[in-house]
């Protein structure tokens, strides 16, 4: 089977299951879809698993800091200055390889803002999304390989 079709099938099944489960669990559905997409954007496989969670979680943390500063320092400039500072930090942290996926940090902050400051819900759904990305890629690869004939062993083909 075509690998993209196989991943598409597994993504579709898992997306439907997540849409149902997230509503049952009270988690924000779209958050996981955002980090699911980041998983593939980061290269998928182990690379996606390694790059996305740390970057997204730091972005959520930085967004939380801005939201809390805005609540403690009521001013028209608190949020813009806070956002400017975290944007700088999210780029600068990329010098550390574990936090090198800059889009993940920006999306993490956006997840926090988009969920109204719900850092726990954003964090849990974000991690689930990365897991769904990995599961869909793995199961898609498995589905694509079904029915393919194994390549002959080099000694077998030489004897033929």
Image: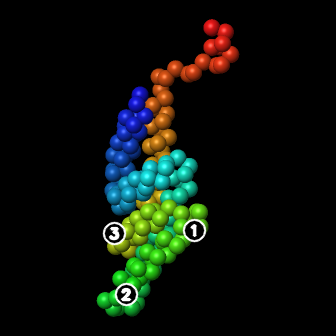
Q: Position of residue 142 (x, y in %)?
A: 49, 33
Q: Position of residue 71 (x, y in %)?
A: 37, 86
Is 12 drawn above or below residue 115 in the view shown? above
Q: Which mark is residue 56?
A: none
Q: Which residue is mark 1?
A: 95
Circles 1 and 3 in contact, beta carbons < 8 Å: no
Q: Mark 1 or mark 2: which is in front?
A: 1
Q: Is residue 130 left or right of residue 19?
A: right
Q: Is residue 46 left or right of residue 2?
A: right
Which residue is pictured at 41% across the width and 65% down the height? 107
Q: Which residue is mark 2?
A: 78
Is 128 drawn above or below residue 94 in the view shown? above
Q: Is residue 67 left or right of residue 127?
A: left
Q: Mark 2 or mark 3: which is in front?
A: 2
Say which of 14 and 55 sits in front.
Answer: 55
Q: CA distance from mark 1 to mark 2?
A: 27 Å
Q: Mark 1 or mark 3: which is in front?
A: 1
- Of helix, strand and loop, which one carries label 3? helix
Protein image colouring? rainbow
Q: Which residue is mark 3?
A: 114
User: Can you see residue 66?
Assistant: no
- Of helix, strand and loop, which one carries label 1? helix
Q: Position of residue 140 (x, y in %)?
A: 45, 37
Say which of 43 and 50 sits in front.
Answer: 43
Indicate which disc, 2 or 3, sits on the residue closer to the N terminus: 2
Which residue is pictured at 44% across the width and 60% down the height? 126
Q: CA distance from mark 1 to mark 3?
A: 27 Å
């Amino acid at each position: 089977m075509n690998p993209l079709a196989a991943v598409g099938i597994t993504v579709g099944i898992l997306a439907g299951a997540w849409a149902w489960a997230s509503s049952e669990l009270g988690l924000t559905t779209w958050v996981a879809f955002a980090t699911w997409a980041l998983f593939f954007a980061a290269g998928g496989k182990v690379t996606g698993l390694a790059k996305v969670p740390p970057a997204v979680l730091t972005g959520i943390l930085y967004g939380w800091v801005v939201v809390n500063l805005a609540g403690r320092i009521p001013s028209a400039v608190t949020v813009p200055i806070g956002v400017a500072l975290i944007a700088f930090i999210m780029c600068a942290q990329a010098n550390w390889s574990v936090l090198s996926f800059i889009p993940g940090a920006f999306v993490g902050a956006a997840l926090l803002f988009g969920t109204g400051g719900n850092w726990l819900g954003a964090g849990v759904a974000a991690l689930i999304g990365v897991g769904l990305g990995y599961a869909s890629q793995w199961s898609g690869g498995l589905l694509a390989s079904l029915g393919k004939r194994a390549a002959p062993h080099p000694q077998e083909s030489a004897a033929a």
